[in-house]
Image: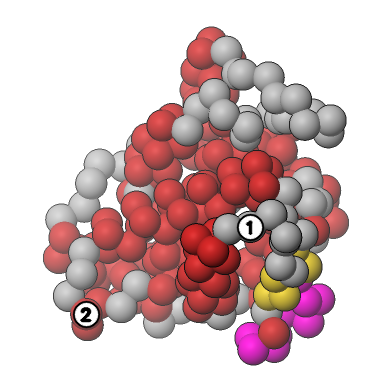
């Protein structure tokens, strides 16, 4: 997971207000935040050879935390580039990075080397879907409930239909449900709790970090 100080700094970055009116972030503010982000992340790693990524991915799937963290560091450039493409919308830059990182974590755990696809395919898709999911939550103000007992994968999400959703929206929501349920089932309990509390119960990342005593 991300370092506690980074998690808290993300949570403290300006975000949309509660009455639905959103202020656009200034480029200077985003650049300053990105500079802090790089400082907190540490060294910016260069891309790894595909063969080495596969080895690390296999180790990560077997529970090797160092291998997983190495991959997360390597793919930070994709999180940042994707977050930049969504700047100026409803979410602050810190929230975009946070959502992107959650999508990255899920995608790496959902990766299946035996299928022959590149990790990049999973990572980029996971990052983008996570960000777009968070944006849709703000825009459509869906009524969403999440079961407290996250151990039960069969009842992980309880999406409540909204009368203003079109058939295409309903189909999109069903696909989101399927993909998110599959991805969430690969996370450990601590990671599920962070995602659940932040994205579905509205708890700030700062409060999550403090409440879970993440260090």
The picture places residue 125, in percent across and down from the top left corner, at 36, 56
Q: Residue 103: within the magenta?
A: no
Query: Looking at the rendering, which quadrant does residue 201 occupy?
Result: bottom right
Spatial CA distance of label 1 from label 2 is 35 Å
- Which colour assignment does the render follow? secondary structure
- Left or right of 25? Residue 207 is right
Say which element carries label 2.
helix
Query: Which residue shows up at 71% across the image and 30% down it?
Result: 15
Image spot of residue 155 (x, y percent): 69, 85
For this view, does 62 lie left or right of residue 103? Answer: left
Q: Quadrant of the C terminus?
A: bottom right
- Closer mark to the observer between disc 1 and disc 2: 1
Q: Which residue is drawn at 16% across and 60% down?
A: 50
Residue 115: assigned label: 2
Question: Dominant secondary structure of the magenta stretch?
Answer: loop
Please, is residue 185 above or below residue 192 in the view?
below
Image x and y of residue 165, in percent: 63, 57
Label 2 neighbour load within 10 Å: few <14, some 14-19, many 20+:
few
- Residue 90 lies in what quarter of the image? top right
Q: Could you say which disc has been placed on residue 165 in the image?
A: 1
Magenta range: 146-154
User: Do the numbered discs 1 and 2 sit on residues whose CB atoms are within 8 Å?
Assistant: no
Q: Where is residue 89 in the image (x, y as percent from the top left)?
A: 57, 29
Q: Is residue 64 visible?
A: no
């Amino acid at each position: 997971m991300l370092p506690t100080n980074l998690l808290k700094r993300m949570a403290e970055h300006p975000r949309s207000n509660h009455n639905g009116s959103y202020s656009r972030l200034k480029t200077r503010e985003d650049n300053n935040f990105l500079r802090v982000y790089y400082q907190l992340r540490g060294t910016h790693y260069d891309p790894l050879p595909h063969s080495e990524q596969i080895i690390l991915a296999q180790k990560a799937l077997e529970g090797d935390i160092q291998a997983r963290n190495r991959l997360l560091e390597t793919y930070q450039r994709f999180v940042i580039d994707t977050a930049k493409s969504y700047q100026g919308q409803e979410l602050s830059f810190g929230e975009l990075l946070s959502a992107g990182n959650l999508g990255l974590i899920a995608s790496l755990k959902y990766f299946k080397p035996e299928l022959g696809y590149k990790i990049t395919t999973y990572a980029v898709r996971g990052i983008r879907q996570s960000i777009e999911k968070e944006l849709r939550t703000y825009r459509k103000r869906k009524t969403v409930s999440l079961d407290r007992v996250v151990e039960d994968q069969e009842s992980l999400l309880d999406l409540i239909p909204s009368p203003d959703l079109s058939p295409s929206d309903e189909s999109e929501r069903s696909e989101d449900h399927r993909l998110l349920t599959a991805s969430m089932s690969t996370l450990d309990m601590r990671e599920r709790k962070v995602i659940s509390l932040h994205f579905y119960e509205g708890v700030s990342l700062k409060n999550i970090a403090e409440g879970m005593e993440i260090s």
